[in-house]
Image: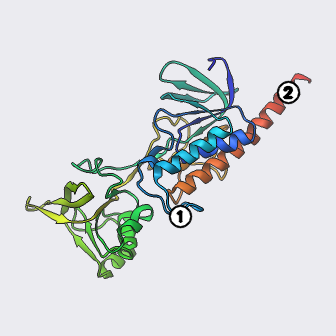
Amino acid sequence: MSQTEIYDLIIVGGGPGGLTAGIYARRAALKTGLVEKGLPGGQVNITEGVENYPGLESISGFDLSQKFLQHAKSYGLEFIQQEVAAVEPGLDFHTVRLANGDLLNSHAVILATGGSPRKLNVPGEMEYYGRGVSYCATCDGFFFREKTVVVVGGGDTALEEALYLAKIARRVFLVHRRDAFRGSRILQQRVTAEPLIEVLWNTVVTGILANDEGVRGVVLKDTESGSSQELGADGVFIFIGFLPNNQLVPQGIKMDADGYVITDEKCETNLPGIYAVGDLRQKYAKQIITAAADGCTAALAAALSVEMKKAEKMTSKFL
């Protein structure tokens, strides 16, 4: 890796969006490097089962990540196992500064840094993520058919996911720390009318209980009396917010009030040649397949942009 070498495209992040971008970029013959400090596949690696990816009825998150990785490698995608310190926009090219001091110059950059569900930060939460603790009912609800689950939260997402789980689970306990929901009125009415959902007001989860088979319950605390009790459950779904990993988004790129990057239909930001895909981008659904779709779109758009940029430079040489 040369510090003076200029890439056509640098992808920051190796989740489904980044890996798919790598596949399409290499198919377009772009000189492409993908920088990822962790395990390729991102959060998908720690998802126990994926059953909604088209063409694969059931696959572990790790195995799906490996398929993405192997596919990308088959096209000769260059993997750079480093941490990115900064992304610096430029006129002729953009610069990706690595934590080890190396500089990667590129005509285009795709930011695929993803996002992270807001955590409760209670004992058992991270230890049993993927083994009963989930942040996505659409992804994991099927595994809790005819079982008892706990949903944590009081916003629109928590109410929507509780209603979704009520179609699958035997019983749903909706735990909210206040005495009123923050979600929309129509969702509140639907939750109240659903006989399989029991709301536990003024209550917080202070711990997640588990055994060798996975989650077996939660520890609840009443915020008014201070008393605690255990509640048996097979799964815990946490919906208290989602945080985009936007620390590397350069200044000047437009973001919404929640910190998601605003792009056009090509996944391009307001800074030409810089794209955002996956959970980092402002959009409706956060799924593996939508992240992959973003990666495809951004790579195709970047390929056209780089081609035009090179053609303009070539033309200017002969003028």
Identify which residue is drawn at 59% across, 51% down.
292
Q: Does residue 147 appear to the left or right of 48 in the view shown? A: left
Please state which of residues 61 and 192 is positioned toward the viewer in this rendering: 61
Q: Does residue 91 appear to the left or right of 166 in the view shown? A: right
Q: Do the CB atoms of the residues marked 1 and 2 lie less than 8 Å apart?
A: no
Identify which residue is drawn at 51% across, 40% down.
40
Which residue, given by chain and number where applicable, does mark 1 sit on? 57
Where residue 214 sits, quadrant-wise, is: bottom left
Quadrant of the rendering where the C terminus is positioned = top right
Please state which of residues 93 and 172 is positioned toward the viewer in this rendering: 172
Q: Does residue 146 appear to the left or right of 262 in the view shown? A: left
Identify which residue is drawn at 50% across, 61% down.
58
Amino acid type, residue under disc 2 in the picture: Met
Which residue, given by chain and number where applicable, does mark 2 sit on? 314
Please state which of residues 41 and 226 is positioned toward the viewer in this rendering: 41
Disc 1 or disc 2, which is closer to the eye? 1
- Relative to residue 154, is residue 130 depicted above or below? above
Amino acid type, residue under disc 1 in the picture: Glu
Query: Crowding at label 2, few (<14), some or many (≥20) Cα neighbours within 10 Å?
Result: few
- Relative to residue 106, is residue 202 depicted above or below? below
